[in-house]
Image: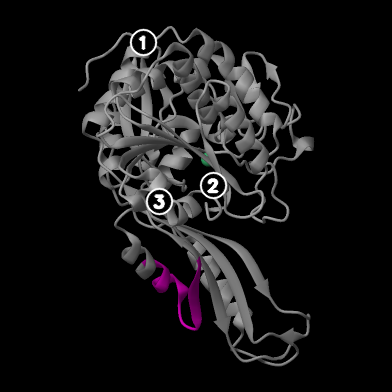
Amino acid sequence: MAETTAPAPLERAQAEVADLLSELIRIDSTNTGDTTTSKGERQAAEWVAGKLDEVGIDSVIHESEKGRASLVARIPGEDRDRPGLLVHGHLDVVPADKREWSVDPFSGEQRDGYVWGRGAVDMKDMDCMTLALVRDWARTGVKPPRDVVLAFVADEEAGGKYGAHYLVDHHADLFENVSEAISEVGGFSLTVRDDLRLYLIQTAEKGLAWMRLTAQARPGHGSFVHDDNAVTKLAAAVARIGSTRLPTVLTPPMKQFIEEVSDAYGIEIDVDHPDEALSRLGSISRMIGAALRNTVNPTMLDAGYKTNVIPGSASATIDGRFLYGQEEAFEAQIDELLGEGVTREYITHDQAVETTFDGPLVEQMVAALKAEDDGARPVPFTMSGGTDAKSFETLGMRCFGFSPLRLPADLDFAGLFHGIDERVPVESLQFGVRVLDRFLRAS
Ligand SMILES: [Zn+2]
C-alpha cells in the first residue's frame, strides 16, 4: 500500500459540493431512451467542462450523435508510467414526473440538510463529488500518484450506446494504459448499529438478457372450437416465467457478502435459503435478493387485433438478468419454462462483469472508508442492475462501484434510485469527497 499522506483540508471542495450538485440537477438531462426526446447531456457536459476549465483542467467533449455528449479529461499523475485509474459517472438521468414529487425534481433545492432532485443519487452526486475534489486539488497543487482519467458520459440510463459504449468503440485511446475504474453503484453505508456500518462495494454486476417471446399457432374464428391458440400458449409461458423463482446461486462476492452480514448481525444464514435472513437488511434486500440468483420478469404483452379473431401469433417481452458465469444456465432455465411452441430472441444483451475483492486498490478503498468512519466495515456485493462498467470492462479494466456515502440509518437509499423525492444528504456528499480524496491520493 502507498504511504498515507495527510489529507488536504478540502475546505472549498466540501463547501461547494452541494451547490455544484444543485446546479447540475438544474440542467435537465432526461434520457427517455430516444435521442429525439432526450435532452441536456450536451449542456451538462459543457457545464462540467466549464467547471474544470475554471481551475485549469483541459477536457474534450465527444458526441456520438447530436447532443449525446460525453466529456473526458486526464489529470497527469506523479508517476506517468503506472497504469491510470478511471473515475466515470453518467450525466443523464431517468425521467421524473413533477406531480409526484414534494419539490420540483429539476430545481436542485436544498432543504433539511439534503440536496433534492432527479440525479441526486443516480448519479450526479458522484459526478459532483469528483468535480469538487479535482477542483480543490487543482487549486491547492495536489497531484495524484498516477494518472486519473475522468469520464462524464451520456446515455447510461439507456444502456450506454451513445455514451460509454461509443467512447470504448471509437475513442479507446483515451483510456490507454488505464487498468482500473470506479463509479456507481457502491460505497454506501448500511447501518447495522451505532458503531457498525457495512459499506457495500460493488465488485460485480449482472448481465442483461432482454428477450422477445413469440408463440405461433393456427389463426381462426373466435366463435369456433379452437385448441391451438397463440394467445393461450404465450400466456401460459408468461405465467410460468413470471411465477418461477430461479434457484439461488452464490457467486464469490455474494458468498463473502453473506458471511460478512452473518458475522455483523451475529446470525446464522442458511446459504441455500438466505432470503429470509437477508430481509432484515431492509429495503436494500430487494436488490440483494436479486443478486443471489438469475431473475426474469415478464414486462410487455402484444397480441391480437379484434375480439372475434384468433391471431396467428402473440408476443411478450421479458427482462432477464443473469449472474456472472451463469449465462448458459440461465438460457437453459428460460427454455425449460417456455414450453412447446414458444420461441425466444434477444432484443438487448450485455455481459455480466465480476472482479475480486482484493489487491491494493481494494485495500485503499477499505482504508479510506475506515479513516473517515471508524465503524466502517466494507464488504463486496453484486449489483442486480447494469452500469457503464460493462463497457469499460471490455478494455481490460477492473471495475468497482465505489461512490462513497455515509448515509443516515433510516434513509431508504435503494428506493431513491429512479424514485420519487430522490435526494442526498449534504453531509454524505462531504464525507464522499473526503473518502475519495484519501483513496485517490493513496492509489
Ligand atoms: Zn446510474
- In contact (CB < 8 Å): disc 1 and disc 3: no
- Residue at 63% from the left image edge and 35% from the top image edge: 46
Secondary structure under tag 2 reads helix
Three-letter code for the amino acid on which mark 1 is drawn: Pro
Compared to 412, does 236 lie above or below?
below
* C-alpha separation, residue under disc 1 versus residue under disc 3: 33 Å
* C-alpha separation, residue under disc 1 versus residue under disc 2: 32 Å
Q: Which residue is mark 2?
A: 156
Give whichever of 378, 267 is nearer the camera. Answer: 378
Q: How many numbered marks does the figure carry? A: 3
Give whichever of 92, 218 is nearer the camera. Answer: 92
Residue 343 picture location, percent across and down: 49, 78
Q: Is residue 75 left or right of residue 132?
A: left
Give whichever of 348, 63 is nearer the camera. Answer: 63
- In contact (CB < 8 Å): disc 2 and disc 3: no
Identify the disc placed on residue 7. 1
Q: Which residue is mark 3?
A: 172
Residue 275 picture location, percent across and down: 38, 42
- Residue at 61% from the left image edge and 24% from the top image edge: 21
Residue 362 picture location, percent across and down: 27, 30
Q: Is residue 50 magenta?
A: no
Say which label, 1 or 3, has the lower sequence index: 1
**Where is the C terminus found, in terms of image quarters?**
top left
- Residue 27 can be seen in this image: yes
- Residue at 32% from the left image edge and 53% from the top image edge: 324
